[in-house]
Amino acid sequence: MHRGATLLAALALVGCAAVPPAEPGTITGRLALQVDAFQDRPSQSLSGSFDLRGNADRGELRLSTPLGTTLAAAYWSPGEARLVTPQGERRFDDLDALSRDAFGESLPLRALPDWLNGRPWPGAAEPAQPLQPGPGFVQLGWTIDLARFEAGHLLASRAGPPAVRLRAQRDAPP
């Protein structure tokens, strides 16, 4: 079974530990990720609540059901990334390797804390370009649409192939 399908199956399960209350500096909300079909890989999608703590170098991202049950958690620090699901724990050299294994695609998870705060990731090799027209920017091959950011909405998309869309709604607007 494709590892992405395994992660998606884990995200569909209910029955892990409850998510603790959010700590200061934690971004919480809901997200939806869609990866279009490409070559021999079927399309994939997932959605759920999220808690994000930390930054590009060290942090954690938890996905949970609407009732607060943890479905999957990613933890990262320099030189290591871990994915914990109901099926167990897997270790990777970095977040890119974790996302490639889980989705068959490298997703910019290191940039996510900055993007969810409405700013380009300063660790990117090339500077972000302003989005034309409208508020937002283009970075790492992704378009970050901030048109509804004041209401807590973010849309990050990559044309592909495969095309990928990440929609996030923060619980507390920035």
Image (cartoon, helix red, strand yellow):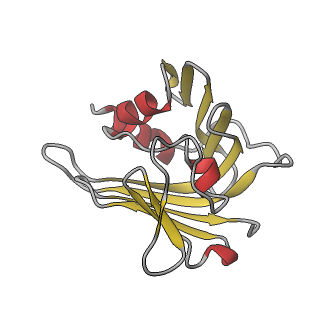
Kindly indicate the quadrant of the structure image that contains residue 151.
bottom right
Kindly indicate the quadrant of the structure image that contains residue 2.
top left
Observer able to see residue 6: no
Between 33 and 127, the one lying in front of the other is 127
Q: What residue sits 43% from the left and 33% below the top?
A: 96
Q: Quadrant of the N terminus?
A: top left
Query: On the rendered structure, is 115 left or right of 19?
Result: left
Q: What residue sits 61% from the left and 39% below the top?
A: 15
- Provide residue 38's location: percent of width, then percent of height: 18, 50
Q: What residue sits 63% from the left and 42% below the top?
A: 62
Observer able to see residue 100: yes
Between 25 and 84, the one lying in front of the other is 25
Q: What residue sits 40% from the left and 57% below the top?
A: 142
- Provide residue 78's location: percent of width, then percent of height: 61, 22
Q: Is residue 153 above or below residue 75?
A: below
- Provide residue 3's location: percent of width, then percent of height: 34, 32
Between 59 and 3, the one lying in front of the other is 59
Q: Quadrant of the C terminus?
A: bottom right
The total number of labels drawn is 0
Query: On the rendered structure, is 40 left or right of 152?
Result: left
Q: Residue furthest left?
A: 39
Q: Is residue 27 above or below residue 16?
A: below
- Provide residue 153's location: percent of width, then percent of height: 60, 71
Q: Is residue 58 above or below residue 68?
A: above
Q: Is residue 99 above or below residue 133?
A: above
Between 24 and 7, the one lying in front of the other is 24
